[in-house]
Amino acid sequence: MAEDVVKFKLKRDELLLLGVVYFYLSCCPYNKVEESFNTQAIHDIIYNTKYLYYYDHISFPGAVPRTFIGAISVALPTGLISYLTSASKAITYMVARAVLGLYVVWAFSTFRRAVKKAFGALTSNLLVLITCTQFHFAFYASRTLPNTFGMCCMLIATAYWITKQWENFLWWSGLAVLIFRFELVLLLGPMLLWELAREKLKMEEILMPGAQTAAVLLIVCCSIDTYLWRYTVWPEAVVLYYNTWLNKSSNWGTQPLLWYFYSALPRAMLTALPLSVMGCLLDRKVLKFTSPALTFLALYSLLPHKELRFVLYAVPMLNVAAAHFIARLWNKGLEFRLAALASALANIVCCGVFLSASYHNYPGGDAMISLHSTYPCTTNTTVYIGNYAAQNGVSRFGEQCDSLYHRQWNYIKTENLTTSKIRHYDVLLVEPSEAESYTLTHQIVGRFHVFAGLDITSVPPFIRTKKREAIYMMKSKQLKKSVEVKGF
């Protein structure tokens, strides 16, 4: 029987990757609208516990329901840590994302051990180093997206595919596909089809275990989600129908057919992309290994709505091809090692550029920090959170003056309110284009900026971040406290 590749410990270089994940977390501690459901769910599980009426998804259900399984897996350890340390909401949110980042790095460690068995220690070591110098994998590792939870399960399932442990493969694949992201069937499915085609695996070996796995997972998932959503639901089936059959995801924009290949992958992989191509061309074993990822990319490109995070699942497998190519040349001369080092340095420079852009992409979070440093929680205050702020950094974890038993503050995110209604609130977080409507009753006390591009300069570091005003904080002229808030 094959040795189980899952071990609950990290090696030193994997701790380096975890450190990179936590560094990005500390630089960008807020969330975007895509992360909103799981972020708010984690908050509500920790702070609202059994008071389902106060859960965010009851008031703001979103376009489609999402599963609570991922949020629960993060909220349980986070809630325990928060309780034992009496941490603030802001710190608790950081802990929650740190827990998720640990899950991802642990899953990557499992994948890495399987790669070591298949391609050797040098390739596995280089795989970790390449991943550390790429921005998007580590950046998204702590973000509460369904894709991130799916990534955890996919990495472990792939490890079991490599080591041919089919029962475990079915469990983790089922969790990835049926619970978190159904599109992962396009990645994990070809792995099974490949083994069936090569007659390394027989249909009867997976048919009944697969059906049993699916039944157990769906019963557990649907029971939990039906209770929390208050109607019978299998969330990922609804998402599949909405995004794929109805093609409603196109409402959020579309990209050309080959966009993943000429835009997303170059940004996600950086200098490892050409190295992975060379690795596939020079070694049939590597090409076979990466064929499920390439199949996934080709098939998923048919869906018009595209985002880089949708195909991050393919990056670890393609990085193996790059790592194996470097490993082949590693002992052939100093010049090859220097070239690999130059490649890593180029990646790090690109990571700095990406981080600079991301750092300035959450003006709503900056506004909430300034708001709470200005007005004490002991005063009765109503805060209107505009749509842009709500989508770019605001979450219930940022509502520091709110709890079930301490409601001096009231945060209003309701959309489509009339201007006359909004004028009655004490503090407004609105876009500059909206501010003119409230100048008679409110005054601007804070301006918060968002990333607006890059400028090339003639002095080091030769790149300058451009920003534009994105959110105004406006205070009612009737409020006695008169302060000027420092913008970001």
Image: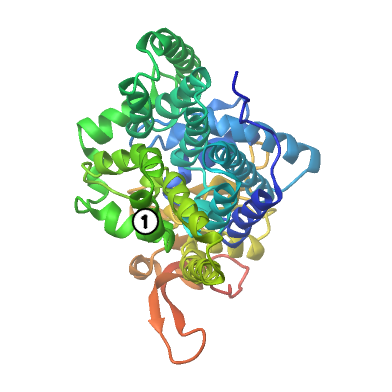
Residue 420 can be seen in this image: no
Which colour style is shown?
Answer: rainbow
Specify the farthest residue to the front: 332
Question: Percent x, y for residue 9?
Answer: 71, 38
Q: Nearer the viewer, residue 259 or 235?
A: 259
At 53% across and 68% down in the image, what residue appears? 348
Q: Nearer the viewer, residue 450 or 367?
A: 450
At 48% across and 12% down in the image, what residue appears? 216
Q: How many marks?
A: 1
The part of the image, by quadrant, that contains residue 73 is top right
Residue 410 can be seen in this image: yes
Q: Is residue 295 above or below residue 398?
A: above
Q: Nearer the viewer, residue 460 or 443?
A: 460
Specify the farthest residue to the right: 84
Provide the secondary structure element on which disc 1 rests. Answer: helix
Does 290 sit left or right of 372 as displayed? left
Q: Nearer the viewer, residue 115 or 373?
A: 115
Q: Is residue 145 above or below residue 365?
A: above
Question: Percent x, y for residue 135?
Answer: 49, 59
Q: Quadrant of the N terminus?
A: top right
**Label 1: which residue?**
278
Callout 1 amino acid: Met
Answer few, some or many: residues within 10 Å of disc 1's Cα (few below 14, many 20 plus, some between 14 and 19): some
Specify the farthest residue to the bottom: 458
Question: Percent x, y for residue 39?
Answer: 53, 42
Question: Percent x, y for residue 34?
Answer: 42, 46
